[in-house]
Amino acid sequence: MRRGWPLLVLLAWGVLCFGAVYPWAYWPLFAAAAALGLTGVARDRAWRDPRLARLLLALAVLCGAIAIQTVALPSWLVTTLSPGVDRFFREFRLGYHPADLNALSLDPAATRVVLAEVVAFGLLLVGAARLVRRWSLEWLIGQVMMLAVAVAVVGIVQAAILDADVDRIYGFWTPRQGGAIFGPFVNRNHFAGWMLMLLPVVAAYGWALLVQAPDAARRGGRAWGRWLGSPDGNRVLLALASLLIMTAALVLTGSRSGIAAGAIAIVAFAGFLWRGLRGAPRLVVTTAVVGVFVAAMLWSGPGAVAARFGRASDDVGGRLSAWRDTGRIISDFPIVGTGLGGYRRAMLIYQTRDREAFYAQAHNDYLQLVAEGGLLVTIPAVLVAGVLILGIGRRLRSGDESPMTYWIRRGAVAGLIGIAAQSVVEFSLQMPGNAVLAVALAAVAVHRPRAPLHSSHAHRV
């Protein structure tokens, strides 16, 4: 079975290139994602799968809605559809006089970048959902786990030996606008967002390896010990160690939203374990999974974590103010929004809190989507989410898959639940490196395996 090197390279590029926040990083990422997605769509004729065809159609409607925001329209039509555009530019530009043709977006260039991202990642979602059927999911997740450990170690080493106020990533790259650096990310919250998505996936991978263990390994202490010393047993121990390292890195970020969302992701996976097990193993296994997360928190320093959460009230005022300002934007741009990517420009006028800290993002992706997209984009976006959720729900209820696929699918869903929770107070998914990981997890969650698979021991981490 083919291995998923192309997707692994995409994920590595996205995370190691500072979350792909700069044009030199995100344009190659978009191009490669689109190419890989098109390969999967064309090779496996994804449109013949009714569920993926519906997803493709919903994505096409979404892309069309975003494209409308960038089209130059007669000024009278723009004023009719979105009176807020004219009011904004009269206040924003001295001596403003509307041109004959204007876009609905306050920042058409930024909207075109977002459109390219949505097209590329939409293709990747559908294409990867087909390609995963050809790949060894066990091998792919094993390699992603090692990538996550490498990223975690970078963050841990930085936290251990470098100054807390370090301003260079990898010791040589200075972010253009500063930030709270952690690991390869400009912002520790975005590092946390990337890491928390993979915590339940790695937990699921380790549990699936354990489930695939020979029955002889479960009959007694000696047999169990011998099995743990085997290559397969070592992989379970490696997954456990990786989970501890990744959780420790997450905790060391000090990201309140990341730690809380990581806990939600782990609890979500524990819920899947609880439903999938019976008797004493149900309590033992779910407690062990949650215990790993708690142990890593304690090892990383509970005092620092408690102090960070104790200072949460210091940031609440800023976020609440930004959310109120976002509400005003929504009321002024209800139909077509400010244009995706236009929130930053809108806040130059709408921000009411002191300007010592400029809120270029709403710190709530859902509010920001409504503000930037209006009904024009929000409705198709909800449609895409609904089609995807229904598709994932059907796959979760299906039983035609191997234990490895069964549990990794649930780990991917738990990771998506975690990042969805963090998005209530953060904007990690606006980092292309995080977004491509979320898309990959969604593809794993919604994909349909070719046929029931049997445990394979041919793939090693």
Image (cartoon, helix red, strand yellow):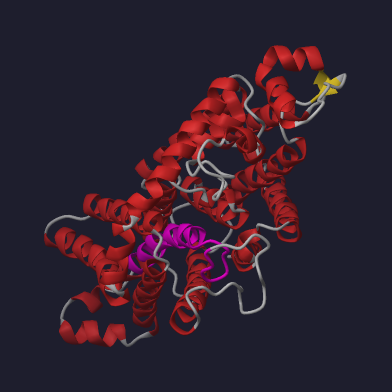
Q: Is residue 387 magenta?
A: no
Residue 52 position within the rendered picture, expressed as x and y whole percent measured from the top left? 57, 37
- Residue nearest the observer in this picture, 393 or 383: 383
Q: Residue furthest left?
A: 280
Query: What is the magenta segment's predominant secondary structure?
Result: helix
Residue 212 position within the rendered picture, expressed as x and y whole percent measured from the top left? 33, 68
Counting labels gives 0
Residue 19 position within the rendered picture, expressed as x and y whole percent measured from the top left? 60, 61
Give the magenta range: 180-207
Q: Quadrant of residue 13?
A: bottom right
Left or right placement of residue 249 versus residue 347 in this view = left
- Residue nearest the observer in this picture, 65 or 455: 65
Left or right placement of residue 42 versus residue 229 in this view = right
Residue 460 position within the rendered picture, expressed as x and y whole percent measured from the top left? 49, 77
Q: Quadrant of residue 83?
A: top right
- Residue nearest the observer in this picture, 303 or 207: 303
Left or right placement of residue 296 versus residue 149 in this view = left
Q: Residue furthest right?
A: 100
Tell me if I can see residue 94 in this picture.
yes
Q: Is residue 204 magenta?
A: yes
Eyeballing the image, is 39 above or below 259?
above
Tell me if I can see residue 50 in this picture.
no
Query: The N terminus appears in which quarter of the rendering?
Result: bottom right
Tell me the residue at 57%/69% (across/down): 184
Tell me the residue at 62%/53% (across/down): 432
